[in-house]
Image: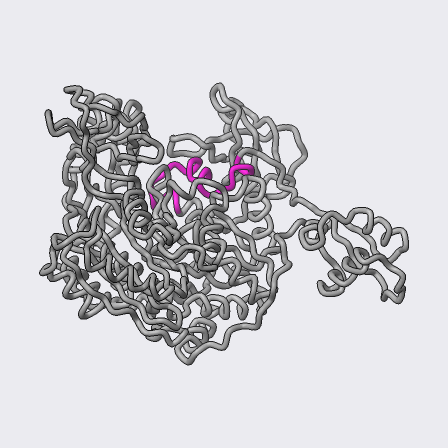
Amino acid sequence: MTIILQIAIPCPLRQTFDYLPNESNINWQAGLRVRLNFGSRELIGIIIKIKKSTDQQSNKLKPILECLDKTPLIPEELLSLTQWIANYYHHPLGDCFQSVLPKKIRLGDSSELQTETFWNIDKPINQTKLGSKQQQILTLLENNNNSIQQSDLYEQIGQCRASLKSLEEKQLLSQQQNIKLPSLIVKEEDLCQLNKEQQNVVNSVFKSRDSFAPFLLQGITGSGKTEVYIELADKIIKEGKQVLILIPEIGLTTQFVERFKQRLSAVIVVLNSSISDTERKQSWLLAKDAYADIVIGTRSAVFTPLKNIGLIIIDEEHDSSYKQYDGLKYHARNIALIRAQRAQIPILLGSATPSLESLYNVQQGRYKRLELTKRATGAKLPKVHLIDSNGPKAENGISSILYHAIKTQLDAENQVLLFINRRGFAPVLMCHECNWQATCTQCDARMIVHQRRNTLHCHHCGFMHRLPTQCPKCNHPELKTYGAGTEQIELSLQKYFPDTPVLRIDRDSMQKVNAFADMIQTIRQGGAKILVGTQMLAKGHDFHDVTLVGVLDADQGLLSADFRATESLAQLITQVTGRAGRGEKEGEVFIQTSQMEHPFWKGLIKQGYNATAEKLLEERKQMAMPPVGYLSIIRAEDQQEQLAIQFLTEVHAILNQQQKVIVMGPVPAMMEKRAGRFRAQLLLSCSTRKPIHQLLDHYIEAISALKLARKVRWSIDIDPLDLM
């Protein structure tokens, strides 16, 4: 009887591979990592299954080179979840582990947890003749249950190696190596007194702690959803369980984690792309082995193994950042729901502007809706005004009405936030002599003017070159810009209000490490009176002195061909307006639009987000579009113009052999050329989910066997958010 290891290998092939064990005396189990030869490369694979065979053919199999773990590193729950992901998203299993595992784990790094020196007081101290630094050390230890990490000690007191050695020689302290945990020194505050609505939410979720129960928490902006999360986390931790919290943006992490640390004496680990690979591995291992009580992270944190998971929270559940657009095209919210269902635990989806998917699930009785209808501080919701953007302008797209409103608030020592969803200086650079426009050579897109860097920049592929001083086509010396981005608005406001600090917050100004956290601190301390920014500013931030919010160029969503654009615009406007008047002062919102009479504005401003969402949901039902109907897209791209279309035409011929699923296309993508590749897509549509999956399962091998399948890049996007 021969043991055969069935192994998932990081490659684009949709299968596992059989290998023989090497000579090592190991208890072979699923979840072990192994090093092996695959073709001409040495790779790390994951054992998925152990088989036994009497077949002589098995002797032709290659043995693995080395087993990297003594016991399975990938828990059974994570193995099973990854297999579900591969099946649901029709993605190669070995490649799925590239998204699921931290880089150092998947590259074969040691699975040992890092340790650190801890200092302990072992016996009562009566000795009084101590130096001031030694006394400081002992006081700090006494305030931390007589034990502290050396790094935390240095952070509080500074370098004190000699004092520690002296205390150790006097046998007042001892040192030992313990597992390295995230810093635990915080200013701990008592849990906040919740209002009746908040307490009702906590009670409802906590009551369901031993069963799968999806809740939609719809709370208006500023209603204290984070306080609810903290209270719930506290209750779950006290039951000896762990909590997974997903947030949409890295920029929200610092303030979010700080609020939890101030309230809870818990081990909190952070998982997002801003931390180092070493930190990420340590946090992942701490969560897996139940040393971490709370995991807070962005999209990919949904894969974190938790030994005793008791609750999942998704903040701003409507946010499109939870969808991965490259490689494995998963949606973190959907995977979190599957995890909660398998673990039989509650999951709380929070948002002031829930996605139509979640609202539809409430209608269908799949989710229970819980509501927070009042601002936690008692603050009133801001007044909203529409301004005609075709009316009198001060300059660069800022209307005279908005300019005077800004001046009034600045005179009253308040803060102002201006939102424009376009970074850079201007979206168009043009020559009036010959009508030349600056366009990207790699994409079907205009180049954006970035005046500070003196460059033209493509925001789609990253291509960049120096700003021309004359027309490249006719050599005319005068080139004009049209439209405005954050950079131009910032310069205009600095000109209008020269004595007032203006802070620009967008991806260009946030490139340094901790830049975002530093800027948030500056805003909170009142160091900037005017804030100009993109969507980064719209999400979850709590600025108590912001009394005016201005939305510039708000019509983009009304003119888009994407069927989700109106939903996204309604969410964005509601979220942005929610930044105003969150403190004791009342807030105002000014929205500039060239379509003053559009029914969208009347509905959103007079009746609110709920009424707008209900109307949009009815439209989706009539069109049989998501969340009522189901879509999938097969995408293809190639450097040769016709190959993507040609490949998808062949795929269409294969798939069109059945009747249940409507197969539309192939058509070029809305932006056909991107990063030097021509893109096309095939749309699959059905009133139920199952036939789409059955169709893809049935024909995926036939599609993979096509000659062009090995030449063009192609992928499957299940439940796509972007049809463009």
Residue 21 x/y as whole percent: 59, 31
Residue 312 x/y as whole percent: 45, 60
Residue 691 x/y as whole percent: 23, 48
The reply, left or right, for residue 130 in relation to residue 440 is right
The reply, left or right, for residue 340 in relation to residue 106 is left
Using the image as rendered, state which of residue 360 and residue 707 is in the foreground.
360
Q: Residue furthest front?
A: 499
**Picture quarter with the C terminus:** top left
Q: Is residue 310 visible?
A: yes
Residue appearing at x 21%, y 23% in the figure: 470
Report the number of discs.
0
In the picture shown, does residue 685 fall above or below 234? above
Q: Which residues are magenta?
A: 85-106
Q: Is residue 654 visible?
A: no
Residue appearing at x 35%, y 38% in the figure: 326
Residue appearing at x 57%, y 48% in the figure: 283
Within the magenta stretch, is there residue 100? yes
Picture colour scheme = one colour
In the picture shown, does residue 596 fall above or below 456? below
**Picture quarter with the N terminus:** top right
Within the magenta stretch, is there residue 406? no
Residue 569 x/y as whole percent: 23, 55
Using the image as rendered, state which of residue 711 and residue 402 is in the foreground.
402
Q: Residue furthest bottom?
A: 196
In the picture shown, does residue 358 fall above or below 84? below
Using the image as rendered, state which of residue 55 and residue 571 is in the foreground.
571
**Prevalent SS, magenta region:** helix
Residue appearing at x 12%, y 52% in the figure: 390
**Which quadrant would residue 461 be assigned to in this image?**
top left
